[in-house]
Image (cartoon, coloured by chain):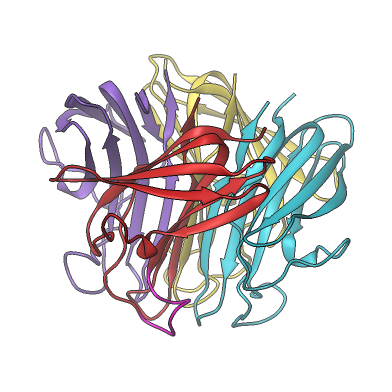
Chain colours: A yellow, B cyan, C purple, D red
Amino acid sequence: MIGRKIWAIAEGYIPSTSTGPAPEMISHETACILNTGDRDAHVTIMLYFTDREPAGPYKLTVGARRSYHLKFNDLEEPEPVPLGTPYSSTIISDLPIVVQHTRLDSRQAENALLSTIAYSQD
Amino acid sequence: MIGRKIWAIAEGYIPSTSTGPAPEMISHETACILNTGDRDAHVTIMLYFTDREPAGPYKLTVGARRSYHLKFNDLEEPEPVPLGTPYSSTIISDLPIVVQHTRLDSRQAENALLSTIAYSQD
Amino acid sequence: MIGRKIWAIAEGYIPSTSTGPAPEMISHETACILNTGDRDAHVTIMLYFTDREPAGPYKLTVGARRSYHLKFNDLEEPEPVPLGTPYSSTIISDLPIVVQHTRLDSRQAENALLSTIAYSQD
Amino acid sequence: MIGRKIWAIAEGYIPSTSTGPAPEMISHETACILNTGDRDAHVTIMLYFTDREPAGPYKLTVGARRSYHLKFNDLEEPEPVPLGTPYSSTIISDLPIVVQHTRLDSRQAENALLSTIAYSQD
């Protein structure tokens, strides 16, 4: 079993403007989730903000032996992620997964990238 | 309880020049701090330099169930962070938190980004 | 013995276009693998996708006291990595190694970079 | 005591060309080292390559309560780091330290950045 069940990403910010062709050059953030196991993983995401109570839970399933590149921009239920707003997130799974956080920022003509394996614990 | 109480960021450097509209494109560094718990976390930051004794303590509170995106550029008491100067930092909390380090460098026309989950221990 | 035997990279995406002189400015992803030990490490890589079964195993040897910068673009057997397609990977070794993930994205005129130490466990 | 004694950076590559004013915009890699303790830390660095035996040891001292931003470009004894060449590194200390790896790549007109906390173990 590869991975852990509890993950957190302290950084979060989807730039509100973009440059370049859609969809690939739209400013976005992703939580890439890997489930190497033989059963589907049920994942719950919560979003934390500066000055309001958390949003969520957002529910998704990552299939057995599948990679899921979750775009925070695409979250809709129970509410979308506000653009240009600092946030953090937790990703909790019923089975071990691995989570990596990435941002593409295309506010200026040339895009910038950041990425890190998220914080995890047992 | 998600997170740990002791965190460190070995890299630190706020570029002294910027390109693009303020405030979002001003070169800056952040320590994004997530407190998922039900009590406020009291956080103490120390800054370490190449050739002088450390600066601090800087004190801040991260509310229960809140995300705090601390801009190092905004630290003022007991002293501001010098620009264009290498430094490191420790972030110590009385309750578990998660910390991620990010820099936006806009010295040139197009911004560059870096980010990493900070080092943590129990 | 420095390192661990089980590693995972949840993010994976080789941009399908590039700008600038080949080979150095071709958009690519690497898994940099360090073997500090005195024996060769035998490494097996698996690739995970959104909507199909995993690809692999890919087999390689990292010599004793050697650094191996594996370009995912160069994987051929049993099949190449599709461009412009989200994926994840696992890197399993018979001896302790250290793995770091890096992407150079040159879709636009100025390249962007991301990097992180991969997730590891015993 | 904050940190660990054994650190490794699997990625390493100093681009051989640069754009922009020296010294700040010269393509470079750093290992930022933090020693929060009350005694000087004695650090030994080894460099690993693709097709030759390791280089080193490189010796340096990180003072008590000091941050040391080591530029790999500046290493000279026993030999300089070759440019445009893949490598990896280990950073071993007699006292706990924290290590973060950063690259500034200015081969093109606009610089790109990457950073990650290094791999550590007890």
Left or right placement of residue C44 versus residue D5 in this view: left
Q: Position of residue A52 (x, y in %)?
A: 85, 46
Instruction: Identify the image quadrant of the N terminus of chain B.
Output: top right
The one of C81 and C94 positioned closer to us in this rendering: C94
Q: Is residue B91 visible?
A: yes
Instruction: Relative to C100, say whether C105 is above or below.
Output: below
Q: Is residue A81 visible?
A: no
Q: Position of residue D58 (x, y in %)?
A: 36, 49
Left or right placement of residue B3 versus residue D100 in this view: right
Instruction: Relative to B44, say whether B88 is above or below.
Output: below
- Magenta part of the chain: D19-27
What residue is rendered at 78% in x and 49% in y? B45
What residue is rendered at 46% in x and 19% in y? A40
The one of B8 and D44 positioned closer to us in this rendering: D44
Left or right placement of residue B115 versus residue C97 in this view: right
Instruction: Identify the image quadrant of the C terminus of chain B.
Output: top right
Instruction: Relative to A73, say whether C18 is above or below.
Output: below
Q: Position of residue C105 (x, y in %)?
A: 34, 61
> Which residue is situated farthest in the left direction here?
C77
What residue is rendered at 38% in x and 81% in y? D109
Q: Position of residue A46 (x, y in %)?
A: 69, 35
Q: Quadrant of residue B63?
A: top right
